Structures are given as C-alpha cells and as structure tokens.
Amino acid sequence: MKDLLRTEDLSRTDVELLLATATEFAEHPLKAKEALAHRTVAIYMTKPSTRTRLASETAVAHLGGTPIFIRGDELQIGRGETIADTARVISGFASAMIIRTYAQSDVDELGKYATIPIINGLTDQDHPTQLLADWLTIREVFGSDISGRKFTYVGDGNNMAHAWLTMGAILGAHVVVATPSGAWAPDSEAVATAQKIAAKTGATVEVLHDPEAAAKDASVLYTDVWMSMGDPESERTEKLKALSPFAVTAELMSLTAADGIFLHCLPAHRGEEVSAEVIDGPRSYIWREAYHRRSTIQAILYHLVRGELEGNIFD
Ligand code: CP
Ligand code: NVA
C-alpha cells in the first residue's frame, strides 16, 4: 500500500497495527524520533484546519522530520499547473504528502502520479485519519471486544458519515448512521462500499432516518457539523431545518447505553448539532479524541513511509 487516499484503502490488519503504534506514540511521542530524520513531509491544504494541521506538523516533528505547510493558494496549481506535474515535483523533495481539499478525484490523481505516500487529510467524501483517532478513543473506553455494541453517527450524511460507516465495517462493528432522507443522506456509493466490506468482515451497517432509533442503546453517539467546509450557504436554512431533529441533546443522549459516550470530530457548533450540556458533559470524550489526532497521524506516516501497510483486501 503506497497511499491512504480513502478509508477503505485500509485492511483490518492495517487498522490494528496503526492503532497499536498510535497507542505507543500517544504515551511516548519521541519513540521513533529518527524515523524521518533529515526528511520532509509536505502538508497541502485548500481548506481551513486546526486539528489536522497541528497534529500533522507535530507528528512529523516527533518523527524527526520537517513539515512543510503549503496553503491552497501558494502552489502553481492555482495558476494552471497540473496535479500530475505537481505530484512529480513534490515527490522529489518530500517523503510523504498530506492533502486536505474538496474533490476526492484530486487526491486520487495526486496518488496516481506521486511516487511518495499521499495521505487524505479530508475531502468532501472522506476523512480517514480522523477515524483512527475516533477508534483509538473508543478502544480506550471500551477495550477491543466490541461484540454486542452499537456505534451510531447522527446528522449530515457527509464525509464523516461515509468514513464512520467504512471504518466500522472494516472493524466488524455494528455501525449505524441516521440522517435526513434525500439530499443530506450519505452517498449511495459510500454506503455500498461499507456494505461490501461488511459482508466480508461480519459487520452490520445500518442507514436510518430516525435519530431516536439510531441512538437507542448505542455505546457511541457521534455527530459532526451540519454545514461542512464548501457546503453552499444558499442551502443553510433548508439544511438546518432538515437536520434539527438530529441534534444531539441530553434527551437523545439519554437513549444510549448506560455507559454510552459522546464523540465529535470538531469543530463543533454548540446549540446546533450538539447541546453544550452534552459536549461539555461527563460522557463527552472529545478532548481525548482530538489529542489522538497526533499519535494516529504519526502512526500512519511511520508505517506508510516504511511500506508496512498491506492495503485494501476487500475487492
Ligand atoms: N477534525 C478535524 O479534522 O479538525 P480540523 O478541521 O480542525 O482539522
Ligand atoms: N464535515 C466537516 C468535518 C470537519 C472536520 C467538514 O468537512 O467541514
């Protein structure tokens, strides 16, 4: 496996290895402090970022390398240089590249032409690095035996909903996504991918439109912003209205399992997709989750650069 372009690029063995390494890096950040010595990692972002940028730059530093952060408007891509040419040039300078942008096809193209590992740091379709931090947090709370547990996401059928379904399927979990029907449901292609993987791993994938049914007895109740980066402002009023029944309130949270926890990839909008009472309450693990962004990205960089991931075995 050369790149992490999509969540489904990872096998279950890869996820287990990444989580084990990330656990070590969480405790001992400098455990592999020479792994990227005298090497650079390009971090190119055409959308804003707090966590992914900070986690990526810190991860590279802890591996002994130098991060080169490049804003979207700073490359010649904006003046018409092709992604293929850009990929070839960056491959000559950096040992890996993390990219955050809009179109998944741009990330796929970069992966095709670059000779170095390309890591998806969020697209409109997917957010694979986030899911590793989420599952590291889940494992810390519940351990690795997830049988009989239900893992629910409620809200917009966006990149996070897609990644939630796919990672849950890879790990053989019972995953549920509840969204409004129609325009804000997850993409059918993403659901089909998760279902295909679930058929091989024994996972259960459910896509619902009823937030109460989804929250009932869940071990994790997860949500994300209702307006993602790049979503058209013209849709805001209609979208927020459609999503309002999916807000994670204390009432919705009370339907979860007795030991159920709340997660959110952040940034959050209190009073919109989640109430302050829930996100700032005792069942919320959001700060641990955000902290794990660094050690999980560090693990991805460590193993991808060393060529130690086997990649998708689900096709
Ligand atoms: N969760 C996440 O990706 O956060 P940022 O957008 O701040 O990177
Ligand atoms: N769905 C959100 C996730 C942010 C981490 C977005 O794409 O803006």
Image (cartoon, rainbow, N blue to C red):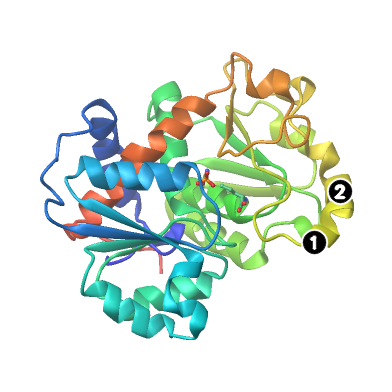
Q: Is residue 236 above or below residue 284?
A: below
The residue drawn where x is 23% and y is 52% is 66
Of callouts 2 and 1, which one flags the residue occurring earlier in the amino acid sequence?
1
Residue 65 position, x and y percent, is 19, 50
Mark 1 CB near ligand 2 (8 Å cut): no
Identify which residue, 228 or 74, lies in the foreground.
Answer: 74
Residue 26 seen in this snapshot: yes
> In which image quadrant can residue 200 be found?
bottom left
- Mark 2 crowd level (few <14, some 14–19, many ≥20, 10 Å Cα): some
The residue drawn where x is 59% and y is 22% is 260
The residue drawn where x is 70% and y is 35% is 269
Q: Secondary structure at mark 1?
A: helix
Left/right of residue 182 with respect to residue 87 in the rendered view: right
The residue drawn where x is 35% and y is 39% is 294
Left/right of residue 310 with respect to residue 253 in the rendered view: left
Left/right of residue 88 with respect to residue 140 in the rendered view: left
CA distance separating discs 2 and 1: 10 Å
Q: Which residue is mark 1?
A: 183
Residue 131 seen in this snapshot: no
Residue 144 position, x and y percent, is 37, 30
- Mark 1 crowd level (few <14, some 14–19, many ≥20, 10 Å Cα): few
Q: Which residue is mark 2?
A: 242
> In which image quadrant can residue 233 be found?
bottom right
Q: Quadrant of the N terminus?
A: bottom left
Q: Which mark is residue 127?
A: none
Amino acid under label 1?
Ala
Q: Secondary structure at mark 2?
A: helix
Marks 2 & 1, CB-CB < 8 Å contact: yes
Residue 251 position, x and y percent, is 79, 21
Left/right of residue 311 with respect to residue 120 in the rendered view: left
